[in-house]
Image (cartoon, rainbow, N blue to C red):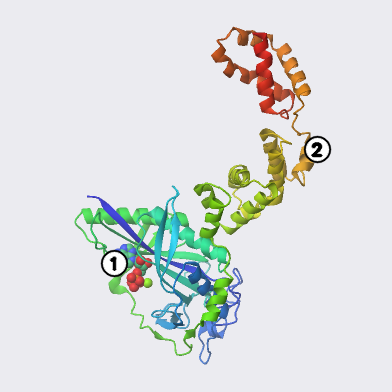
């Protein structure tokens, strides 16, 4: 039997407001436990929440970026449950009238094909605190710094059909929110995490199978691994005549498996009702239009511009627009060297390779975009050849010079294009290699092309890599053939 995977994602994005969604307490990451929770975050008697307008604006910007409807009115509801990290006894969320309606996110797969994924809605809510299980000698501590941090929960339709599509969707959301500047998107710090809903169905069947929900997965890689495990588990279960039960599961990255957390029967009854402390949010058209008019260029638009105006391939355009840092870096290199294709090659080749080797992000690149652009310009204007360019790059990387020109000057890497100088080096190499010359002369003419490599190498060595390789090749061929 052929099975088809069905996936829907609920992505939680921590919004980059300075203060919390309903209070003035700071949202800064990494403070001492319980130093950034105020009476409102703790839900002490008598307090009243005040909605943070910055959170509203960020949510609306996201909605506009995915071409969603923005309803005029949205409403906050209380989701009631007990948990030690939730001192209020309820989470303020939006159940029935979310701030962002239906929209669409386009994903790009590795082979360059695209697919639209529908977003059901996105709503605002507050985060809870954190339980601390270490350092308490068998007891549990609670840090409420995170309580009240604004979250945007983005709920997709079950439109994804593979782990790769789910990861691509998460990457697309990540790139939209970081382009918009509404979240730092730092998954390691929990600024973006998702619940993964997975089911399988026989290929060709229209009705969805029963799903399991894997809670709080916090990396692109874990999303793929959790889905792979879960799909296999469900198929095995069904093929053995069993049934998938609707339940919440946890992914354990150490053991690479998901485990049951609670089943539907044990699920909470949240007793949602509109929060009496908060007025409905009413957005007028002028407010929304103002936000729309000030949206930055978004990943999809940038990708299209890179492809259509700069002439990059679909693949290059998609890689170079994946993050705002990457796109900005590439554009500066391009502006300095004035050649988009060469800029793309260097950013994705030499630079990406070096960053990967040292596990650095482009924001922490030791070579600035201006420095790389100037280096590429020297390749384009033939001041240096490709080999010397790599040397210059390495020197820039190691901080051995402030600019490509400084390094070219200091290390004498300027390309030798003077025919007389190259001929002199060739004559010397020929004089020093009688045996190889004899071999060349005795070889069949169609074998000689390969044998010339030895001489090219010797001449390049004699020039310390600075001779123009094309000229060396041409002149060598003329001189050697004259001897045959
Ligand atoms: P609930 O109301 O229980 O939260 P929703 O209908 O809102 O359920 O769906 C929650 C998430 O689960 C959505 O992202 C949705 O796309 C996804 N989903 C729903 N049904 C399935 C299914 N059969 N298989 C996979 N994902 C599903
Ligand atoms: Mg839900």
Residue bearing mark 2: 410
Count the numbered circles shown. 2
Q: Position of residue 133 (x, y in %)?
A: 48, 68
Please tell me whether residue 384 is drawn above or below residue 434 in the rendered image.
Answer: below
Residue 310 visible in the picture: yes
Q: Quadrant of residue 28?
A: bottom right
Find the distance from the CA under tag 2 to the CA under tag 1: 68 Å
Marks 1 and 2: in contact by CB < 8 Å? Answer: no
Q: Quadrant of the C terminus?
A: top right
In the image, 471 versus 100, the foreground residue is 471
| Disc 2: CA contacts within 10 A as few (<14), some (14-19) or many (>=20) | few
Dot 2 lies on which element?
helix
Q: Would residue 283 be found to the left or right of residue 226 on screen?
A: right
Residue bearing mark 1: 246
Of labels 2 and 1, earlier in sequence is 1
Q: Please report the residue visible at 52 percent of the width from the left and 63 percent of the height from the top.
A: 176
């Amino acid at each position: 039997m052929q099975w088809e995977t069905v996936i829907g994602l609920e992505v939680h994005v921590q919004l980059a407001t300075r203060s919390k969604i309903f209070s003035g307490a700071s949202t800064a990451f990494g403070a001492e436990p319980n130093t950034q929770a105020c009476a409102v975050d703790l839900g002490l008697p008598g307090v009243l929440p005040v909605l943070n307008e910055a959170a509203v604006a960020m949510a609306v910007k996201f909605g506009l970026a995915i071409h969603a409807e923005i309803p005029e009115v949205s409403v906050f509801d209380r989701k009631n449950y007990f948990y030690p990290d939730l001192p209020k006894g309820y989470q303020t969320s939006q159940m029935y009238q979310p701030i962002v309606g239906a929209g669409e996110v386009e994903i790009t797969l590795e082979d360059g094909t695209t697919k639209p994924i529908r977003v059901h809605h996105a709503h605002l809510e507050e985060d809870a605190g954190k339980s601390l299980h270490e350092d308490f000698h068998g007891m549990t501590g609670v840090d409420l710094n995170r309580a009240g941090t604004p979250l945007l929960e983005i709920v997709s339709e079950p439109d994804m059909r593979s782990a790769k599509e789910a990861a691509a969707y998460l990457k697309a959301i990540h790139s939209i929110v970081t382009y918009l500047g509404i979240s730092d998107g730092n998954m390691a710090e929990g600024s973006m995490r998702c619940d993964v809903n997975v089911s399988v169905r026989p290929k060709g069947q229209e009705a969805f199978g029963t799903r399991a929900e894997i809670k709080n997965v916090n990396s692109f890689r874990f999303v793929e691994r959790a889905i792979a495990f879960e799909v296999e588990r469900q198929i095995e279960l069904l093929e053995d005549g069993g049934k998938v039960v609707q339940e919440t599961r946890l992914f354990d990255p150490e053991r690479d498996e998901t485990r049951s957390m609670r089943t539907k029967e044990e699920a909470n009854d949240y007793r949602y009702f509109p929060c009496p402390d908060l007025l409905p949010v009413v957005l007028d058209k002028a407010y929304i239009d103002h936000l729309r008019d000030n949206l930055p260029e978004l990943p999809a638009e940038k990708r299209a511009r890179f492809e259509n105006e700069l002439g990059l391939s679909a693949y290059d355009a998609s890689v170079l627009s994946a993050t705002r840092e990457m796109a900005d870096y590439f554009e500066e290199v391009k502006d300095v060297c004035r050649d988009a294709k060469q800029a793309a090659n260097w950013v994705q080749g030499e630079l990406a390779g070096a960053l990967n080797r040292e596990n650095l992000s482009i924001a922490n690149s030791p070579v600035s975009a201006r420095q790389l652009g100037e280096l590429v310009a020297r390749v384009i204007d033939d001041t240096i050849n490709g080999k010397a360019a790599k040397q210059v790059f390495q020197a820039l990387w190691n901080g051995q010079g402030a600019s490509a020109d400084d390094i070219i000057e200091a290390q004498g890497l300027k390309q030798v294009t003077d025919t007389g100088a190259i001929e002199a080096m060739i004559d010397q190499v020929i004089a020093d290699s009688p045996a190889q010359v004899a071999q060349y002369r005795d070889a069949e003419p169609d074998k000689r092309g390969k044998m010339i490599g030895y001489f090219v190498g010797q001449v390049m060595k004699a020039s310390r890599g600075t001779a123009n390789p094309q000229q060396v090749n041409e002149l060598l061929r003329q001189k050697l053939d004259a001897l045959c």
